[in-house]
Amino acid sequence: MTSALARAIGIAVATLIVGALPAVAAAHGLAAVYESPLPLAVYLVGAAATVALSFIFVLARDLHAEEAPPRREVAVPRFVRLALKAIGLIGWIWIMAQGIVGGSSDGAVAGLFLWVYGWVGIAMLSALVFPVWEWLDPFTTLYDICAWSLRSVGIKGMAPSTLSARVGSWPATIGFAIFVWLELVAVPGTEGLTVVLSVYTMLTLALMAQFGRDEWRSRGEVFTIWFRTLGRLSATGPAELPGGRVTPGVVLRRPFASGVLYANWSRARIVMVAFAVASIIFDGGSQTVPFAAVFGAPSLLPKTLLLLVFLGIVAVGALQVARDVSPGAIGAGLLPIAVGYLVAHYLTFLLIDGQRILIAISDPLQTGADYFGTAFWKVSAGWMPPGLVWTVQLAAVVGGHMLGAWSGHVTAGRDIEAARHARDIRHRKIHDPVSARNLRMREVPLAVIMVILTTVTLWTLGQAIVQEQAPSGSVPAVDRRG
């Protein structure tokens, strides 16, 4: 991260603090659990001003990217890789075993592993710490076991088919939208999630056999592509190569957030990140009283249409920015925002609902056992200071937007310079040259959108929620926004 960016963050944070000081220390309700130490309006105005001023600073200074840091590959110890593979496989077997045996309890691991630890926990680890999914992935482990078993009895596989380059990673993006729909609209119970996991496992293994394990992981497997995309932000990310594949057994060490600046942002990946941002806002907004007052409690089809419309609007807007500025600008700008929203909305969901693993280990097959005396554990949020929770949420949302403003603008400037260089080499015009002033003017609508998104997402976090009854056996109804 450059010193200019550090100065920008310092100025923006100072602005936010100064804006909040004159406020009266009244309390504003954050659902039934959390209260902000200051009125919500103060936070909304201060956060919006911070994002706006940070964007103005970035545009005024016309920051540029430094040279790409050298690739520093670090080998992951074999015992770490094997341990992660074992954990992933045990988790998959556990879900299948519970689905076969049946039963119902708060220790159901299908929703716990897929939504709480997977959709949220692994996503946060991938974006902020380490690409654990590269080895935790149970589908790849199952494929390797099946392939080894067949080879051991003398059965050789056929040569994999070629996956058209035009397909890109659109299969993963479409699959991502389907999982978003499952989480936010369909909300299947334990039995339904077990069926979904079984079908997805068989489909993934078949497509790996058809197109090759690594090829399908880099082009079509939903979770691998999503977690690799998130890993571009982390200081320790997957060693991604051109075409989406990775160098096996190693990770890349680099400055935090530098990976988003030099990544290849295809339209499919841009849409995937846009879907992520839109789905989190939709999830928060759809639980508020104003949403219920307008739409009531929509059934499956109306809520599906609402979700599709919202996802479509955000995706089309992202593609339009990619067209007007550059694909790298919107990709690098949106990813930090998606991660910030993920932390703000779902961190407490992970910390509170994640406690249900204590129930699961005491009654692993939901038969009424109590092996470790924790089968009747009650999840608790009392140990989390409300002020700290709200501060983390505020910092995640505003910080994500500030980082997105910097990385989006820097990437846009780099892409314009690359286009000019290519034009000069080929001695022909391949793109209408964009001056620095015109580039900044084209980014103004993006800055306005960021300010609006900051305000909206913090507003949803500050609203009372309307909880729907969760299906039998699914994750208990909780405020997933934090």
Image: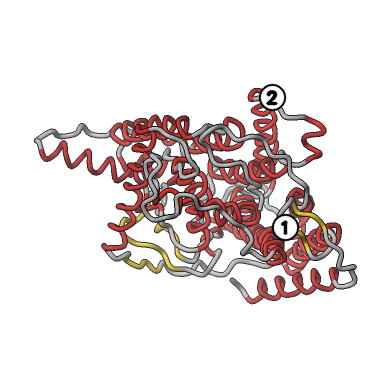
Question: Disc 1 marks which amino acid?
Answer: Tyr
Q: Residue at x 47, y 68 (%)?
A: 254
Compared to residue 166, the image places residue 42 above or below, namely below
422 sits to left or right of 357: right
The one nearer the camera, 402 or 125, is 125
Query: On the image, numbered disc 2 is attached to which residue?
Result: 302
The one nearer the camera, 335 or 357, is 357
Q: Residue at x 51, y 54 (%)?
A: 355
- Front tag of 2 and 1: 1
Rendered location of residue 108, percent (x, y): 45, 41
Which SS class for mark 1?
strand
Dot 1, how many residues are within 10 Å of its Cα: few (below 14), some (14-19), or many (20+)?
many
Which SS class for mark 2?
helix
Q: Residue at x 69, y 58 (%)?
A: 397
Compared to residue 460, the image places residue 253 above or below, namely below
Q: Quadrant of the N terminus?
A: bottom right
140 sits to left or right of 305: left
The one nearer the camera, 85 or 251, is 85
Query: On the image, numbered disc 1 is attached to which residue?
Result: 34
